[in-house]
Amino acid sequence: MDKENLSVVLHSPGDLRLEHRPVPEPGPNEVLVQMHSVGICGSDVHYWQHGRIGSYEVKKPMVLGHEAAGRVIKVGSGVKHLQPGDRVAIEPGVPREMDEFFKTGRYNLSPTIFFCATPPDDGNLSRYYKHSANFCYKLPDSVTYEEGALIEPLSVGIYACRRAQVTLGSTVLICGAGPIGLVCLLVAKAMGASHVAISDLIAERLEMAKELGADFLLQVKRGDTPEELAKKVEGQLGRQPQATIECTGVESSIQTAIYATRRGGVVVLVGLGSEMVTVPLLSAAVREVDIRGVFRYSNTWPVAINMLASKQVNVKPLVTHRFPLEEAVQAFETTRQGLGVKVMLKCDPNDQNP
Amino acid sequence: MDKENLSVVLHSPGDLRLEHRPVPEPGPNEVLVQMHSVGICGSDVHYWQHGRIGSYEVKKPMVLGHEAAGRVIKVGSGVKHLQPGDRVAIEPGVPREMDEFFKTGRYNLSPTIFFCATPPDDGNLSRYYKHSANFCYKLPDSVTYEEGALIEPLSVGIYACRRAQVTLGSTVLICGAGPIGLVCLLVAKAMGASHVAISDLIAERLEMAKELGADFLLQVKRGDTPEELAKKVEGQLGRQPQATIECTGVESSIQTAIYATRRGGVVVLVGLGSEMVTVPLLSAAVREVDIRGVFRYSNTWPVAINMLASKQVNVKPLVTHRFPLEEAVQAFETTRQGLGVKVMLKCDPNDQNP
Amino acid sequence: MDKENLSVVLHSPGDLRLEHRPVPEPGPNEVLVQMHSVGICGSDVHYWQHGRIGSYEVKKPMVLGHEAAGRVIKVGSGVKHLQPGDRVAIEPGVPREMDEFFKTGRYNLSPTIFFCATPPDDGNLSRYYKHSANFCYKLPDSVTYEEGALIEPLSVGIYACRRAQVTLGSTVLICGAGPIGLVCLLVAKAMGASHVAISDLIAERLEMAKELGADFLLQVKRGDTPEELAKKVEGQLGRQPQATIECTGVESSIQTAIYATRRGGVVVLVGLGSEMVTVPLLSAAVREVDIRGVFRYSNTWPVAINMLASKQVNVKPLVTHRFPLEEAVQAFETTRQGLGVKVMLKCDPNDQNP
Amino acid sequence: MDKENLSVVLHSPGDLRLEHRPVPEPGPNEVLVQMHSVGICGSDVHYWQHGRIGSYEVKKPMVLGHEAAGRVIKVGSGVKHLQPGDRVAIEPGVPREMDEFFKTGRYNLSPTIFFCATPPDDGNLSRYYKHSANFCYKLPDSVTYEEGALIEPLSVGIYACRRAQVTLGSTVLICGAGPIGLVCLLVAKAMGASHVAISDLIAERLEMAKELGADFLLQVKRGDTPEELAKKVEGQLGRQPQATIECTGVESSIQTAIYATRRGGVVVLVGLGSEMVTVPLLSAAVREVDIRGVFRYSNTWPVAINMLASKQVNVKPLVTHRFPLEEAVQAFETTRQGLGVKVMLKCDPNDQNP
Ligand SMILES: NC(=O)c1ccc[n+]([C@@H]2O[C@H](COP(=O)([O-])OP(=O)(O)OC[C@H]3O[C@@H](n4cnc5c(N)ncnc54)[C@H](O)[C@@H]3O)[C@@H](O)[C@H]2O)c1
Ligand SMILES: NC(=O)c1ccc[n+]([C@@H]2O[C@H](COP(=O)([O-])OP(=O)(O)OC[C@H]3O[C@@H](n4cnc5c(N)ncnc54)[C@H](O)[C@@H]3O)[C@@H](O)[C@H]2O)c1
Ligand SMILES: NC(=O)c1ccc[n+]([C@@H]2O[C@H](COP(=O)([O-])OP(=O)(O)OC[C@H]3O[C@@H](n4cnc5c(N)ncnc54)[C@H](O)[C@@H]3O)[C@@H](O)[C@H]2O)c1
Ligand SMILES: NC(=O)c1ccc[n+]([C@@H]2O[C@H](COP(=O)([O-])OP(=O)(O)OC[C@H]3O[C@@H](n4cnc5c(N)ncnc54)[C@H](O)[C@@H]3O)[C@@H](O)[C@H]2O)c1
Ligand SMILES: [Zn+2]
Ligand SMILES: [Zn+2]
Ligand SMILES: [Zn+2]
Ligand SMILES: [Zn+2]
């Protein structure tokens, strides 16, 4: 292990720097990971551009990155299930307290949770990174590092589809075909959904969705009313969807989601938009269309590894660009421009393979 | 049985008449009921005043009333579980089709359901009324007719508390202390809720709530912001409620409900207000506060009868006024003015007891 | 339509006859179906051989068959969603009463349910058969009649996997690779199960399971103890299964199911064996391995049609033999000998295609 | 704080000693508790008499006791929610690993959990005891120490009733009126159960149950068959119970539980008996009577404190005997003889109040 630890550090809006940080020392229940592949998320770019998301504000320099996989190179004294050499995927959220949320299995809701690259917690866009061993999951040989890194966005999809109660023969609408809408699509199909429609404003994004298995594409145009779009979806699917997974955060799309969903169905809100929105809540209420939020995920890594190991889902096409860690700024710029789907940073100078 | 069948018929907004209608003849799976006690609901008054609720419009004369109990006096050829003389409570919604909703136990969502006093279906504010035997439930001797009639509003409370997942030790906020908020209160306590706060604009309604078991009263004043009210509730309960049952339909109260509810909790929408509302949906989404509507109820009568028979809940104080059927107009006027809680019409000229 | 209605009628144990029965006349909510394909089930053979299953006894001649699809040729006056010419799959269980089970969506538990070929109710191994229109489901053009008939056994699999809570990434053990074990396998994979092991005594059955997608095969030998088998399963899967679906009914296999299942998991009992069994219930109790029965199914046809229409599951390989209706006895004999998986009777003399 | 720490230590079967142990020093996330009241459980007596329960064997001296409450006198450096002087109830099970069970909210199933007085882990029948602060719950002033100690057995009841899905208007059978059956009774009533029957062999235990609110008593006699007892229960309740909570562990009582429970209902196994039992599993399977075990509890303390604080349940009558810690052996002997319901040991020489 060398001494330098090149890291992608955000100092203030627009000020992203490649810096050397000390190599961290793992605590008794931690492992030190040599990072291999880290995906760039919309939130990383948002912090870079705006310095904040909602009430989370970058007040001191913060390492970015939370979609990550690497190799364990050192383990703390209390760690039993991992050893140096293990290839691992990293779950970025680690609860700090055994509060009511953790005790009931909903640790993602714990208000004091540590989360990579959510200020003030550092992320893992570095050469070396230490993390709670309990939130590092061993990858089987058949799963690549990049697949391991993709478990993070995939987890949003798994968790969203769970909350949407997608199952065999489900009819599903997904609003938005960005990276998150696309992972929801992959997961919904893997859970047995038989009819999935997906919407977007941008034709290329819908094309990608088609390649990944979408059954119906809904190209949204400025001026389409939510009621009209809902009718179109019903026409495409032959019936109203039981579950709609909203992945844009845009008000009109949330309205469409509510109108489109069948009585007794579920709208899952993944997309994050404005604090206040105007929505047809009465239509949801009297048709008992439940509205459920998604805040990250919990208990998804083991499931995702099972999925990937058994080849039930192919996430590889999601990676459209790769850059060495040194070129992080160009990589961020690529994501900012909305080119491709997922941009990967390759942190190991000696192994830039997938 | 006499031949005349005095009935409370709504002809058009404001035009409520007492008329003689023919005594109906029960079909093979129906029973004829001599009505005893029928409560007046806010919706009855609304139809009377406005001739419509949402898309439901009174286009031809319609008998009002749907909170009812009476005595079976004739049974159809196929009826096995009832016989003349049986005292019954009437569930006003009867699915007409074995559609997906009925087959999955959510018959309240069946779009073609028959429902008393929802146009064009006649209600049961009459001397005699026929109904599907499967939706008439035998009352034990220990349960009065009026208690039987109150099962209808009580059912809204049972169903709302179920959807709110109220259980032992739950902390609950109820918005609105009208008849519906009050039945939610009674049911929440009977399900084991340990801390129940209830809000209203009107001090007398809160007084009534106190008498019925509310632990905390929140008097809402014009000008109070939803965030402030949410804070007050947290202060009263010592923590945020896991479940909030919104029984006003008012936009600001829905906002309060969302802000007030704990992470991972549930807001149940019982109150019906405007089609579009502006709400802090993002706050609900990122804290995974689920929003669930209530459309009437399903599978509540047997539970309610068990509750009443075992004296777990005392609904008798809800009845604050009684009128003979002949004085229906005064009775409606009393409800319209918001006097008391529940007004009962006594349909049997020979027995006006509770 | 011709006047004769050739039917497969069981008179007493061993006495199976091909007889002409009158063509039935559909009631107002019924349809008359010209039968096309009807699969033979183990229970049909059991009635033929023994004249009874448990307390159900053939006391008067009964038509066999309950895995069926055909073409509607006449509809009752009240039927709206079907018309002559529609190709339909038939759900054999039709609740007769709106009892608590039906009202709560568990109509399969209704004690008075009508069920094809469960004495005294006639089945549909005939040229013509009438059935409740609400329990006939229209098949899309892309789904064959035989696939339609296979929805019945497939429904057992869907319902069992639902009760087993199989979902994305699940690890599953299926005990027994008869027709029912195999449909459970197909459904578990379609629901996203990543690791499925299946056991049987017979090597050929396991071979078939392998072809249908089983990940691990467990050949059971007389003398293997349940504890040993449980250990082997853990070895194969790399961990204990979260769900075990028992499809043999054999005592030692139920024991294996309990020992094999992970803490907090589920054993689903599909196989029907002796009334009393000796099982390690304490091991299940202290590890909170829930034990859940399966009695047929409810609400599976629409899901199954979605699955088949979207090609998520391929059931065609299950059909290993076909006979014209006239050769019903040979067909039954084939099933009795355990040859192949599913034997189809072709009831339409003018169309013997799949 | 004095230096001596009188403790009740089990050395080997039958060899129970009062010894001085060092006062422990709390770690960073621990608190030191001056014990006030500790109840004696059947399992404590069982270890005393037999030195083992199943595979748990007392191999080195172990302090007994796990139903406990006391006062915090020292807090570790990382403890935020407690401070010296706080009165607390102690949850005896503390997960040691963040394994899949803990992460999904079922930490009671974690195989490596620490549990007071389950070998080799020491219990809290001492003057001073240190415990994970996260599993110590602050008691409001209105809740006594003894009520705090009773939260442990009460938790078994809460958890059992949850798994039994007891709710408003439920009909319930409880088998066995020992301390555990009685807490199940109290909790079932507090959750809204309207009709509760309870069985026992011993008339006095049933009398106690009657005083605590049981609606029906079933005195079991040697020679009663399970089917007969099931019929009697149905006669008493007027219908079969939806939920049966088995609290004896006796084979014939488990059989009764299965026969007695309604189609679609639940049998919860709390009682722990022989490893292998012979039961009518087929009857459970075809009627979809689910069988669910109970292993201790999870997430019950906060609920129990809410219940006690709001006076929804009165557990005080359960305490029938009290002894100072010094007289532990007499106290154990009292429990062994089955006298009364709950025996309390008073650990604080300066405060022997409830
Ligand atoms: N809840 C969570 O835990 C969580 C986690 C990750 C991401 N997110 C959120 O999910 C959302 C999606 O993330 P992403 O990375 O895919 O973002 P993205 O911006 O790449 O994708 C959003 C897509 O929605 C499309 N879109 C915009 N308006 C639309 C409309 N009216 N109808 C249909 N499509 C429309 C856009 O063209 C774009 O393709 C973001 O709001 C993000 O903040 C939430
Ligand atoms: N979803 C259903 O199936 C269903 C069934 C029955 C009734 N409802 C609806 O439930 C609601 C309540 O019915 P009800 O009969 O009790 O009506 P109601 O009008 O008698 O009671 C509403 C109460 O809310 C109070 N209120 C108004 N604004 C408030 C605010 N900002 N904060 C707190 N309290 C406020 C009012 O003072 C009043 O006491 C109505 O909207 C009704 O349409 C729905
Ligand atoms: N619960 C329901 O609603 C329902 C519905 C349909 C069928 N069933 C039952 O499901 C079971 C399976 O039906 P099927 O048609 O597949 O029957 P089947 O007899 O064709 O298949 C049973 C398989 O189990 C295997 N087997 C026997 N002992 C075994 C053991 N110890 N370990 C492993 N495998 C063993 C047999 O070799 C056979 O292949 C039957 O008991 C049937 O009655 C139940
Ligand atoms: N699963 C768990 O986590 C857990 C926790 C605590 C206790 N337990 C178990 O719960 C059971 C009850 O505990 P307890 O402390 O109340 O024990 P207990 O021995 O005091 O009570 C058992 C009662 O069952 C009665 N009984 C015996 N045979 C009966 C029969 N055939 N029919 C009806 N009643 C009968 C006895 O007379 C006695 O009153 C024990 O088996 C104990 O091991 C389990
Ligand atoms: Zn992200
Ligand atoms: Zn009403
Ligand atoms: Zn069959
Ligand atoms: Zn105990």
Image: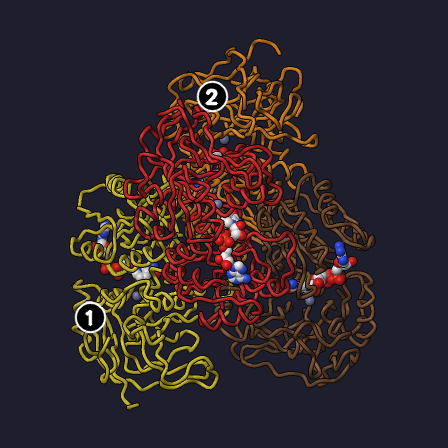
Chain colours: A orange, B yellow, C brown, D red
- Protein chain holding label 2: A
Residue B34 in the image, given as x and y percentages of width and height: 31, 82
Residue B309 in the image, given as x and y percentages of width and height: 35, 69
- State the SS at label 1: helix
Q: Residues within 10 Å of mark 2 (few under 14, many from 20)?
A: many
Three-letter residue code for mark 2 = Asp
Q: CA distance from mark 1 to mark 2?
A: 65 Å
Q: Are marks 1 and 2 in contact (CB under 8 Å)?
A: no
- Kindly identify which numbered label has been placed on residue A122: 2
Q: Please name whichever residue, A9 or C255, is drawn nearer the observer in this view of the structure.
A: C255
Three-letter residue code for mark 1 = Phe
- Residue ID for mark 1: B332
D334 left or right of A136 in image:
left
Quadrant containing the N terminus of chain D in the rendered view: top left
- State the SS at label 2: loop
Q: Please name whichever residue, D190 or C113, is drawn nearer the observer in this view of the structure.
A: D190
Q: Residues within 10 Å of mark 1 (few under 14, many from 20)?
A: many
Question: Quarter of the image holding residue A188?
Answer: top right
Q: Please name whichever residue, B106 or D139, is drawn nearer the observer in this view of the structure.
A: D139
Q: Nearer the viewer, mark 1 or mark 2?
A: 2
Q: Is residue C30 above or below residue B297?
A: below
